[in-house]
Amino acid sequence: MDFDDTPEEVVFRAEARTWLDAHARRIDATSLSDLRTFRSRTEEEDEANLDEARRWQRTKAEDGWAAPSWPAELGGRGLSPMLAGVFAAEEAAYDVAGRMFSVGTDMVGPTIMEWGTVDQQRHHLPRILRADDIWCQLFSEPGAGSDLAGLSTRAVRDGGEWVVSGQKVWTTAAHYADLGFLLARTDPTVPKHRGITAMAIDMRAPGVEVRPLRQIDGTIHFNEVFLDEVRVPVESTIGPVGQGWAVALSMLTNERASIGGGTGYSFEQLVQLARENGRTDDPTIRQRLADMFTRDEILRYLGYRVRTASASGRPPGPESSVMKLAVSARYEIGGDLVIELEGPAGTLTGGDAPHGGRFQDLFMGQWAPRIGGGTDQVQRNIIGERVLGLPGDVRVDKDVAFRELPRSSRAGT
Ligand SMILES: Cc1cc2nc3c(=O)[nH]c(=O)nc-3n(C[C@H](O)[C@H](O)[C@H](O)COP(=O)(O)OP(=O)(O)OC[C@H]3O[C@@H](n4cnc5c(N)ncnc54)[C@H](O)[C@@H]3O)c2cc1C
């Protein structure tokens, strides 16, 4: 593989940079005084961040950059995964809220292109592109995370509507989302993977209650969502009834393909932090810095690998599991290192801590990428089975009707 830009990529990168320079401020990734902060601890900060992210999304939409891998006729640029990756990497070097609507642009949009009706595509895609509608992903439940197909939220048909009841959890952005991409059990008499249906749900419909979960770093990122006899028009069903598992797999594949990229600070900023705290002569710290440098390089090459796989028409497969593991290891090892570099000041938080507590946020936030989008252990299972050819997990329930499965809650039957 050639790691240098191809002539096409050189031209494209220059075009992307020219556009970004004209519309945003480039960050100095070598300086600790230019660390990116984009967090909100209060409703007002949430609103302000959302407004800023929406403004940026609409600016991009004006010139076809809001979802550049979407076809041009749908408002994108029809870019290959490789070129879309080049744009994402360039955008990450600017002081913008670039990833706030990725559930819509990277996950829901492509899934609706694959499974949605023409009417659904016409209605939803332009609204996703301009962030007129913000989406959340209503998959995980208290009893169904890694074993997502075991979900028990049920949808029962009543004339032209589904009546949906159950509980979702860990729903990122549900507290400000307009629409939810929901998986519900519509047939408990068949095995668990076969009785699921996907649908779009209005997050402000009667019966939807969103309860934000405040995290250890003081921010609200995800929520519990309670659904009590919520009425959903059958026209909002996405894909065929009973084939929600296949629809969900499309969405999860798109999610894994979009995970990666930046981890909050550059290697140069890390070295600067070590220097600022007088730790660069410490041999164990030097060794750990070298480890971080190596990890960053590996991540860069894994990124090429994932994009090359998609560029050659292969869907993102086990490469994205390897990538996901490498990203979460970077968060974990880097999160511990930054706090150690700050010494006693590492125990402070918020405005009392050095650099406004940015490194404390990174330390406390390290668990999110290790769990979200499939846990590290689940990624290891995928690599074990699909790359190393190890025997599969024992799956005793795959041919048993969902309602026959022993469960702590009977909500889905
Ligand atoms: C930051 C973040 C954002 C998220 N956003 C969303 C969202 O927007 N929408 C949504 O639907 N969900 C979301 N999630 C939920 C996420 O998908 C689940 O947390 C994840 O799939 C794990 O499920 P669980 O929490 O139920 O843990 P469990 O599945 O109960 O796992 C508990 C432990 O058991 C291990 N384990 C489970 N099964 C196996 C196995 N077969 N082999 C080995 N180990 C196993 C796990 O690795 C874990 O350590 C988010 C999570 C996080 C952290």
Image (cartoon, helix red, strand yellow):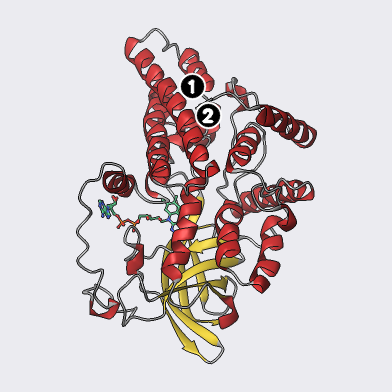
Residue carrying label 2:
265
Label 2: element kind: loop
Q: Is residue 151 left or right of residue 200?
A: left
Q: Marks 2 and 1: CB-CB under 8 Å?
A: yes
Q: Is residue 70 above or below residue 365?
A: below
Tag 1: Cα neighbours inside 10 Å, few (<14), some, or many (≥20)? Answer: many
Q: Nearer the viewer, residue 90 or 384?
A: 384
Q: Nearer the viewer, residue 112 or 21?
A: 112
Q: Is residue 150 above or below residue 129?
A: below
Q: Is residue 39 above or below residue 119?
A: above
Label 1: element kind: helix
- Residue type, label 2: Tyr
Q: Position of residue 388 (x, y in %)?
A: 26, 41
Q: Quadrant of residue 335?
A: top left
**Can residue 70 be seen in the rendering of this structure?**
yes
- Residue type, label 1: Leu
Residue at (69, 49) in percent of width and height: 66
Quarter holding the C terminus is bottom left
**On the rendering, which quadrant does ligand 1 occupy?**
bottom left
Residue at (60, 73) in percent of width and height: 204
Instruction: Tell which residue pokes out farthest to the bottom in this image.
Output: 159
Instruction: Tell which residue pokes out farthest to the top in this image.
Output: 281
Mark identifier at residue 319: none
**Can residue 171 be seen in the rendering of this structure?**
no
Q: Position of residue 310 (x, y in %)?
A: 52, 44
Residue carrying label 1:
270
Residue at (59, 67) in percent of width and height: 179
Residue at (59, 36) in percent of width and height: 37
- What is the C-alpha distance between the residues marked 2 and 1? 7 Å
